């Protein structure tokens, strides 16, 4: 899915092509079960929401989509010039997305007490050929003017001042992420906290470590396993590739890896990892996060994923 797809999708949202609803979102990851609580909001004037959606989409197109240089698969390293995409059936978010959708479908009319963590705009197409669109913004939309350190007043029609203690609702003219059909598109990392990805990424890291250790190509394997479990950036393992794992499992491949990473080997060409730094370098190599400068032969770390050609 490209930048042009996003532009075309939002430009096709007009008039009665979609039916929109607004939901306030409260999240609690501290307990078992569905962490998402949503409250469906209605408007006194039916045109308020449609006018807001129109203004929102115009500015999302102008300031968020048009400046994009690329739309790329999610790898945990979002840049300001790219938009990440992630299938909603990906193991990273499938369960959380399903729970969120379930909460929206069964949203009560009763207002939820406490602070909100965001709001959802659910767009249901009126024609079969159009995709469903869900727009999400993180942050509490409710503004309380009644503060301990200040008082707020408003002018009445008689020119008098009247204290204003009502809560206000502020809806922003940008989006943190949206879902079109079965794909999530994110402009920042807000969805990671909303979907509690820290826990999921830790589980991914542990699975990846066991896959690497399962190759049985290390001297003092338990020490190496300890180094790898101590690696501090679980997102790195999002880009662990089988191509590099296959190289690790051949004697010739390990010789090449050892030479490039300056790691010693045994007579049977098993890798000798003696410290955390060497383990970190191997992880980054397997996950396409380092390359070798052709002029200096120095290893250089990168944020984005590189292809295998940079190592020859």
Image: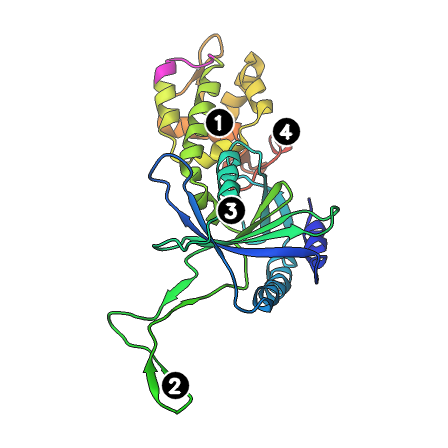
- Which residue appears at 58% of the width and 23% of the height? 242
Residue ID for mark 1: 261
For the residues carrying marks 3 and 1, which lies nearer the camera in this image?
Answer: 3
Percent x, y for residue 3? 68, 51
Residue ID for mark 2: 155
Residue ID for mark 4: 312
Q: Which mark is residue 148?
A: none
Residue 13 position (above or below residue 278): below
For the residues carrying marks 3 and 4, which lies nearer the camera in this image?
Answer: 3
- For label 3, the crowd category at 10 Å Cα-Cα, with few meaning under 14, some 14 to 19 and many 20 or more, is many
Contact between labelled residues 3 and 2, with CB atoms less than 8 Å apart: no
Mark 1 to mark 4 CA distance (whole Å)? 14 Å
Residue ID for mark 3: 104
Callout 2: SS? strand
Percent x, y for residue 255? 53, 17
Q: Is residue 221 magenta?
A: yes
Q: Is residue 225 magenta?
A: no
Q: Residue furthest front?
A: 109
Question: Closest to the observer: 83 or 61?
Answer: 61
Instruction: Tell me where the magenta segment starts and ends, as one range.
Output: 216-222
Location of the N terminus (image quadrant): top right
- Which residue appears at 70% of the width and 63% of the height? 15
Callout 3: SS? helix
């Amino acid at each position: 899915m490209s930048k042009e797809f996003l532009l075309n999708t939002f430009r096709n949202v007009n008039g009665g092509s979609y039916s929109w609803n607004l939901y306030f979102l409260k999240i609690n990851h501290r307990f078992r079960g569905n962490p998402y609580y949503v409250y469906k909001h209605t408007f006194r004037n039916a045109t308020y929401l449609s006018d807001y959606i129109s203004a929102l989409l115009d500015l999302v197109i102008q300031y968020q989509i048009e400046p994009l240089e690329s739309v790329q698969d999610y790898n945990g390293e979002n840049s300001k010039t790219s938009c990440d995409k992630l299938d909603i059936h990906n193991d990273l978010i499938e369960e959380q997305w399903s729970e969120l959708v379930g909460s929206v479908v069964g949203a009560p009319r009763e207002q939820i007490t406490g602070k909100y963590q965001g709001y959802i705009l659910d767009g249901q197409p009126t024609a079969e050929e159009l995709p469903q669109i869900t727009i999400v913004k993180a942050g509490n939309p409710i503004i309380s003017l009644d503060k301990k350190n200040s008082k707020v007043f408003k002018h009445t029609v008689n020119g008098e001042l009247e204290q204003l203690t009502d809560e206000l609702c502020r809806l922003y003219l940008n989006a943190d992420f949206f879902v079109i059909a079965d794909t999530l598109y994110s402009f920042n990392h807000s969805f990671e906290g909303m979907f509690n990805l820290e826990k999921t990424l830790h589980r991914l890291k542990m699975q990846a470590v066991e896959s690497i250790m399962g190759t049985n190509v290390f001297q003092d394997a338990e020490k190496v396993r300890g180094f790898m479990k101590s690696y501090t950036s679980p997102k790195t393992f999002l880009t662990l590739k089988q191509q590099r794992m296959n190289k690790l499992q051949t004697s010739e491949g390990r010789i090449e890896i050892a030479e490039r990473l300056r790691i010693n080997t045994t007579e049977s060409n098993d890798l000798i990892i003696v410290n955390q730094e060497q383990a970190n370098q191997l992880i980054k190599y397997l996950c396409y996060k380092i390359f070798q400068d052709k002029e200096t032969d120095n290893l250089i770390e990168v944020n984005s994923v590189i292809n295998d050609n940079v190592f020859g």
